[in-house]
Image (cartoon, rainbow, N blue to C red):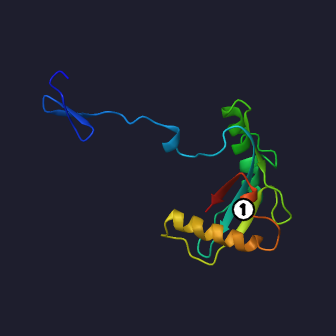
């Protein structure tokens, strides 16, 4: 092979090592969120003990879904970027308004890793939904606002 040596998946040529790019297969692709169709989106709005967000759940609903007339919002931009192929609709239930569920958590979040806080919020939301006939699995996507 023209003086090239292969060792551990790397090719060495004149002392310089180059790596071949791994081929992507369906098996090793990440499973990302839905890209077309209608996606029901539930927004979990965390209310921790130590930090105040500064926006209400109504304001977030407007920012995300345009429920109070905001013409440029997450929903409108997802639709525009997908050329109308993806539409976010607010999750519906008697427990929350316009797709936003306020989730009080019994923790301080300052200095905590975001993944830890997301886990706390998810657990608290599941507790709120117990006995309601609604599950977090009923929705296509869940957004956490911390």
Task: Please provide percent x and percent y for residue 132.
Answer: 82, 70
Q: In this view, does 110 lie to the left or right of 38?
A: left
Q: Which residue lies furthest to the right in this view?
A: 94
- SS for dot 1: helix
Q: Mark 1 sits on what residue?
A: 136
In the picture, the quarter occupied by the N terminus is top left
- The x and y percentages for residue 109 are 55, 71
Check the picture and name the quadrant holding the C terminus: bottom right
Q: Nearer the viewer, residue 3 or 64?
A: 3
- Residue 41 lies, in percent from the top left, at 73, 52
| Residue 74 position by quadrant | top right
Q: Which residue lies furthest to the front in this view?
A: 1
Query: Would residue 101 appear left or right of 27 to someone viewing this image?
Result: right
Q: Residue at x 78, y 56 (%)?
A: 99
Name above or below for residue 31 compared with residue 131.
above
Q: Residue at x 72, y 51 (%)?
A: 140
User: Residue drawn at (57%, 46%), measured in percent from left and top?
Assistant: 31
- Residue 15 x/y as whole percent: 13, 33
* Residue in front for this viewpoint, 45 or 11: 11
Determine crowd level at label 1: few under 14, some 14-19, many 20+ residues with C-alpha closer than 10 A: few
Q: Nearer the viewer, residue 27 or 128?
A: 27
């Amino acid at each position: 092979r023209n003086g090239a040596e292969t060792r551990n998946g790397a090719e060495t040529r004149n002392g310089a090592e180059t790596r071949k790019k791994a081929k992507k297969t369906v098996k090793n692709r990440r499973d990302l969120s839905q890209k077309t169709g209608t996606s029901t989106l539930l927004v979990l709005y965390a209310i921790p003990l130590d930090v105040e967000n500064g926006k209400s759940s109504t304001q977030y609903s407007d920012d995300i879904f345009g429920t109070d007339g905001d013409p440029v919002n997450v929903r409108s931009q997802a639709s525009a970027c997908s050329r109308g192929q993806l539409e976010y609709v607010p999750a519906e239930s008697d427990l929350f308004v316009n797709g936003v569920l306020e989730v009080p958590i019994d923790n301080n979040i300052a200095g905590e890793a975001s993944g830890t806080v997301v886990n706390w919020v998810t657990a608290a939301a599941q507790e709120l939904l117990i006995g309601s006939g609604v599950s977090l699995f009923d929705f296509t996507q869940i957004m956490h606002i911390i």
